[in-house]
Structures are given as C-alpha cells and as structure tokens.
Image (cartoon, rainbow, N blue to C red):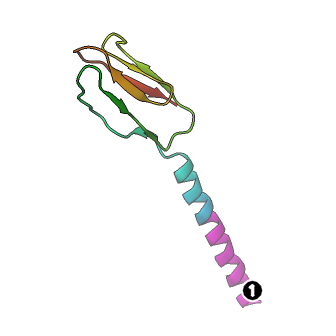
Amino acid sequence: MRKWTIAVAGLLFVMLTSVIITKQNVWASPYISEKTVMMKTGQSHTLKLKNGKKVTWSSSDKKVATVSKKGKVKAKKAGRTTITAKV
C-alpha cells in the first residue's frame, strides 16, 4: 500500500510540474527580434515577433517608414519612427 501511495504522489508531482511549465511557456511575453534598426532610404528589413501569434504592425510616422502585415519595414525618407507590434 505504501509503494502505491508513493507512486501516485510521484505521478501527481510530475503532472503538476508539467502544468506549471506549460503555463509559463504559454504566458511568455512576445518580443520583437531587434530593438533598433538603421536603414537608408529605399532599404527594407523584416522584423519578426517571437512568442507571438496574431500580430498587427504599425508605424508611428508612415512618411519615414511603412510596415507590411508580415513585418517588412521599408524606409521612405530620413527621420525616426517607431514600429509597433500589437498582439
């Protein structure tokens, strides 16, 4: 009977640990592949979102740079802009 109790307790411990690890992975914060990118006019660069699923990209100044639905940034003219990924 004691061996049975230890086996069940061990199995429950493994199951609870698996659930906790899974929860941590599910709730891991998404992040963009690069924080800063310098480009010349006409150049393009694709940003990737890690740990994210559905994302909406946007540019704070579309005259400086635009961004496609897939995260491809295209430099339009000199200046600064912020590219945002909304998950």
Q: Which residues are magenta?
A: 1-16
Question: Residue 74's x, y, as percent?
Answer: 35, 22
Asked if residue 42 lies left or right of residue 86, the reply is left
Q: Quadrant of residue 35?
A: top left
Report which residue position mark 1 lands on.
Answer: 4
User: In the orientation shown, which residue stands out farthest toward the top?
Assistant: 63
Tag 1 secondary structure: helix
Depth check, front residue: 15 or 37: 37
Magenta: predominant secondary structure element? helix
Residue located at (27% from left, 31% from top): 37
Asked if residue 72 lies left or right of residue 69, the reply is left
Residue located at (62% from left, 71% from top): 14
Query: Is 3 covered by the magenta stretch?
Result: yes
Disc 1 residue type? Trp
Crowd around label 1: few <14 · some 14–19 · many ≥20 (10 Å): few
Question: Residue 21's x, y, as percent?
Answer: 55, 59
Query: Is 29 covered by the magenta stretch?
Result: no
